[in-house]
Structure formats: structure tokens, C-alpha cells
Image: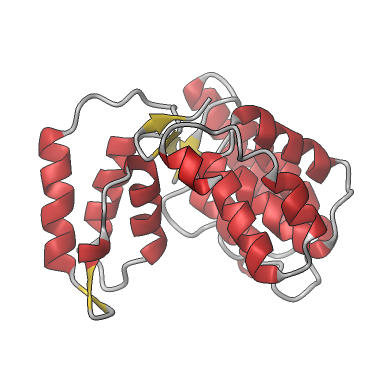
Amino acid sequence: ALAKAKRGDFSGIPALIELAAGDTHPTNRRLCAELLGDAGPASAVDAIAGRLSSGEPSFELTLAWSSVLMRRGRLSDVPIVLAAFEQVAEIRDADILAVHISECLESGYDLADPQDHRSFAHYRHAVLARCAELADRYGSDEVLLDAGERLSVNGLARRTLERLREPYFPCELRRRFECATGIDCSSFYNRRAFNPMAATALLEDFLKGATAHEDGVRCFFGHRIP
């Protein structure tokens, strides 16, 4: 499925839904969820949204399916993930769902930890208020978002470049940029050590020569995802 998707053929991706649901090995489940989130056609991700909203998944699949939805970044999916999160909020490791929600809705960390709020009800109110604010800004809750902004390959490159100037660089940004563009970003690291100068040069070169990518469009290795 990955090899085909790199060539712009996404026909193998939907089969990963059943593969992840039927395989109890955490590595396989994680890899399926990552590829579905990065390259899943809209119909496949919509099917996952239906499964999550039905209350069907186990705790492990709740985490996996929520990560897929928030990696796509559609605003209307956030209440689905939020409701699923509330059902498992007392379970250890569930707080990763708040991180996914935060990465979709904001550039900061106000929504990244429910413990920063007086109760889960207050946290829920804050998330839904942010959703309403963004729906009003963009005129729809069907918009695709990344860090509270309309999804954009060039925007991701600029945000990644900005984070290089901060003390901690999240490797997830490198992975997402590489997935979207297909550009080899192995130069970000040299013998497992982070190399910010090489990363800066690569991103600046990309932005200098970047063509106008359509906002709100998901891409995988430079191919538009159907």
C-alpha cells in the first residue's frame, strides 16, 4: 500500500482499516494508522469517523482511529474525537488524544492537557469553543486544519522552519513534511544527531522554489489524495 501510494495510487490504503482492526500487534496497528492518516482517501477516513462515532472500537483502536482523524485535520471530526476521548479519559495514555486535538486546532498548547482545566467538562467547553471560532473564521466546519490554520504544504514548511529556531524540534514535523512532499529529509539528522543547519537549508530551498500549492488539499509524496 505504501509503495503504491508513493506513486499516486491510493487504492491499497482502505484495506488497512481491517488490517489494523484485526491485528493486535501494536506496531502493525500504529503503522496502519499512520499511513491511513497520511495517505487515506477521504472515503476511507470518513469510514473510520463512522466507526469511532459508533463507539465500536477498543481503547487501542480509539487511539489509532482518533490519530487518523486528527492527522487529516477536518474540523468537523474534532467533536467525534473529543467524545471518544471523554469515554476513555480515565485510562492511562489516553491524554495523547488531547495532543492530537491541540495539534489540529492551535499552534500553542492551551488544549494539549485536560489537567490544565478545572474538569473535563471545562476542557470540552474550551475545545468546542475553539472549534466554533475556527468554523466562523473559515465559514465551514469541513475545512482541513493544521495547527489552527488551513492545511497547506507551504504553511507546513514555514511552520517547520520556525520551529527549528526553538530549543526543541518535534520530529513529527519532519515526518509530515517528508510525507506530503516526498522530499528526502534524512539530512535533518547526522549520525542520529539533529542537524538544524541542514534542515534550515532544505526548507528554505523548498520555499524559494515552491510552486503555489492549493490550500486545504492533502498530498502524499507530492500526489493529491482523492
Residue 130, compared with residue 61, is above or below; it is: above
Total numbered labels: 0
**Relative image position of residue 19 (x, y in whole percent):** 74, 52
Quarter where residue 200 is shown: bottom left
Residue at 39 percent across and 56 percent down: it is 175
Task: Give the image location of residue 152, x and y in percent.
Answer: 36, 34
* Depth check, front residue: 224 or 138: 224
Query: In the displayed structure, does residue 15 sit left or right of residue 38?
Result: right
Residue at the location (44% across, 46% down)? 147
Residue 150 in sight from this viewpoint:
no
Q: Residue at x 43, y 56 (%)?
A: 108
In front of the other: 217 or 33:
33
Residue 123 in percent (x, y) is at: 68, 56
| Colour approach in the figure | secondary structure
For the N terminus, the quadrant is top right
State the image coordinates of residue 101 (x, y, percent, origin top left).
Answer: 59, 51
Which of 220/99 is in front? 220
> Residue drawn at (29%, 49%), measured in percent from left and top?
159
Q: Nearer the viewer, residue 205 or 160?
A: 205
Instruction: Indicate the quadrant where residue 75 lies.
Output: top right
Q: Left of 149 or right of it: where is 35?
A: right
Q: Is residue 57 visible?
A: yes
Q: Residue furthest top?
A: 139
